[in-house]
Image (cartoon, rainbow, N blue to C red):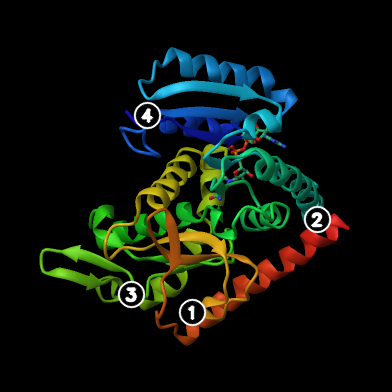
Amino acid sequence: AKDPVRVLVTGAAGQIGYALVPMIARGIMLGPDQPVILHMLDIAPAAEALNGVKMELVDAAFPLLKGVVATTDPVEACTGVNVAVMVGGFPRKEGMERKDVMSKNVSIYKSQASALEKHAAANCKVLVVANPANTNALILKEFAPSIPEKNITCLTRLDHNRALGQISEKVNVQVSDVKNVIIWGNHSSTQYPDVTHATVTTSAGEKPVPALVNDDEWLKSGFISTVQQRGAAIIKARKFSSALSAASSACDHIRDWVCGTPEGTWVSMGVYSDGSYNVPAGLIYSFPVTCRNGEWSIVQGLSIDEFSRKKLDLTAEELTEEKALAYSCLS
Ligand code: NAI
């Protein structure tokens, strides 16, 4: 039997945490034959709720679940973890300035970076979900210099999956037959959902999405804004932000990273930019990636038309501003 993998979920008493931990315990993140030990971190005001989640995990009698650590101590939470899913953060409350939210999260990610650096297993893979996801991941990277930058990522897979969903509804095909959309940039409303290279598998082979959709106007406006604004639409409908889809996408992100992407398929991940596609180096930016042997690499050589170029640059500008704002909060 395989040794258990230790998976940290921060903010585990929150909404996404509640959807995510059973998925991990069921084998959806790491596979149906991979035992897991869950490490759940939250803050003191949520300690009792966190303990309730632990009770439910016991009650669910998951065969793959070999242990549960539920704690408010970041050191205990981070010790020995192989995968860290960072969902905990400070939400934007009414009347708060962007800078105030940034400042709270920057200090959380700075201190959790040190806890991970000192106590996580070597080669721990980190996925930041909490917003501002890209910039939280960047701060985590800066304050955990001994963790390789290739091990620190943020979640844009939810946006990627939303784009697949929109295309499948528009063309009336199964979502599993749509692939190779791209989310470029920030997990925010400046992200650029790009279908230029996306395809649909049909009985007559793989067809390009732009030709099948055959509605350039929709692809260039309605589609893009629907994906960009989907988070807000979910809040409006549910009164809470997306949770099951966020949790499921976080599982997709880690599973593909660890187990690899299928041949001919790429996914979107927020990763440390090396300057590919003339995106400024040193930002955590969402790119198309393929994964193999537990490592991602940015898909190279895709053509970028003038329309796309502007959108790639716009979201990079926002990330550069966020980075400057984050640094101004530190000093
Ligand atoms: P939530 O408010 O229900 O849960 C957040 C949890 O984090 C709470 O239990 C809170 O006590 C905890 N927390 C706060 N500070 C902490 C700290 N220092 N250490 C550990 N835990 C801490 O929020 P929800 O709905 O679960 O969302 C979590 C985050 O994920 C939010 O920042 C949200 O904006 C973000 N998000 C990101 C998505 C993405 O695609 N990247 C999609 C959906 C949400």
Q: At 55% across and 54% down in the image, what residue appears?
A: 151
> Mark 3 and mark 2 in contact (Cβ < 8 Å)?
no
Q: CA distance from mark 3 to mark 4?
A: 41 Å
Position of 6 relative to 178 (above/below): above
Circle 4 sits in a helix, a strand or a loop, which is it? Answer: helix
Identify the mark at residue 26; answer none if there is no mark: 4
> Mark 1 and mark 2 in contact (Cβ < 8 Å)?
no
Which of discs 4 and 1 lies nearer the camera? The answer is 4
Q: At 44% across and 85% down in the image, what residue appears?
A: 305
> Which residue was labeled with disc 2?
99
In the orientation shown, which residue stands out farthest toward the right?
Answer: 331
> Which residue was labeled with disc 1?
308
Which of discs 2 and 4 lies nearer the camera? The answer is 4
Q: CA distance from mark 2 to mark 1?
A: 29 Å
Q: Earlier in the sequence, mark 2 or mark 4?
A: 4
Name the quadrant where ligand 1 sits. top right
Amino acid type of the residue that numbered disc 1 sits on in the rendered structure: Ser
Across and down, in percent, residue 149 comes to: 59, 59
> Mark 3 and mark 1 in contact (Cβ < 8 Å)?
no
